[in-house]
Amino acid sequence: MKRMDASFFKAPCIELAQLLLGHYLVHELPDGRIAGRIIETEAYQGPEDEAAHSYQNRRRKRTEIMFKEPGLAYTYQMHTHTLINVVAGPIGTPHTVLIRAVEPTDGIEKMHLLRGVLAKETELTNGPGKLTKALAITMDYYGHPLTERPLYIAIGKPVADIESSPRVGVRNAGEAADYPWRFYEKDNPFVSKFR
DNA sequence: TTTAAGATGCCC
DNA sequence: GGCATCTTAAAC
């Protein structure tokens, strides 16, 4: 699979969230490749977005990476799960795109093993915590450039039919809770459930 | 040193 | 609806 060029990630956050749809998240393991087509994302616009970890330019240990170059991975722990974001541009602006769901394409059997629960194929990767487990993505990838092996974005085909909605799980974010910054492919059964 | 809270998911 | 169980910051 052809890896994405670093310049791709320079797009503004909200645009990048939509541009990422249709491309692939790939993890090359010693015993094979696991990958999924990105079909759901959320944009987090740093300073002016109350729902973002980097609201008001908060510099925390975990948010430091957001201020660096676009295309790096921002991984963090949510209860028992790891979530993965793509840092968006420009440098110095703490914007990120959360990957919320992918459609499994490679190594589906391996994903079942990694998930460890009896899951229907549509439930294998339909949530941010689920897809990281299915793709064996851990906190070790904090700061990893997503243009490099073994974990990278590969070129697919842009999604034509994009829908948007408020973001999931940010109801306490005041006005920002209603911003329609969640993007997903229309009618795709692998999209996560809204809560 | 202790506590609280969270961009979640599984099980009861 | 409870709870698991990790990271971080802020309280004590």
Image: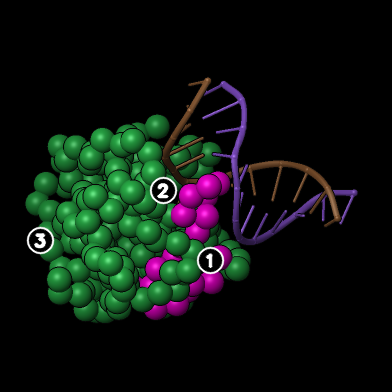
Chain colours: A green, B brown, C purple
In the rendered structure, which disc, 1 or 3, sits on the residue that comes first in sequence? 1
Which of the two discs, 1 and 3, sits closer to the camera?
3
Q: Which of A176 and A27 lies nearest the eye of the viewer?
A: A27
Residue extent of the magenta highlight: A62-82
Disc 3 crowd, CA 10 A, few/some/many (<14, 14-19, 20+) = few
Give the CA separation, mark 2 to mark 1. Answer: 19 Å
Seen in the picture, residue B2 relative to A74 is either above or below; the reply is: above
Seen in the picture, residue A108 relative to A178 is either above or below; the reply is: below
Which of the two discs, 2 and 1, sits closer to the camera?
2
Give the CA separation, mark 3 to mark 2. Answer: 25 Å
In the rendered structure, which disc, 2 or 1, sits on the residue that comes first in sequence? 1
Q: Which of A124 and A68 lies nearest the eye of the viewer?
A: A124
Q: Residue at x 21, y 74 (%)?
A: A4
Q: Are marks 1 and 3 in contact (CB under 8 Å)?
A: no
* Residue A111 percent coordinates (x, y): 29, 51
Residue A129 numbered tag = 2
Task: Point out the residue furthest to the front here.
Answer: A31
According to the image, label 3 marks what residue?
A: A157
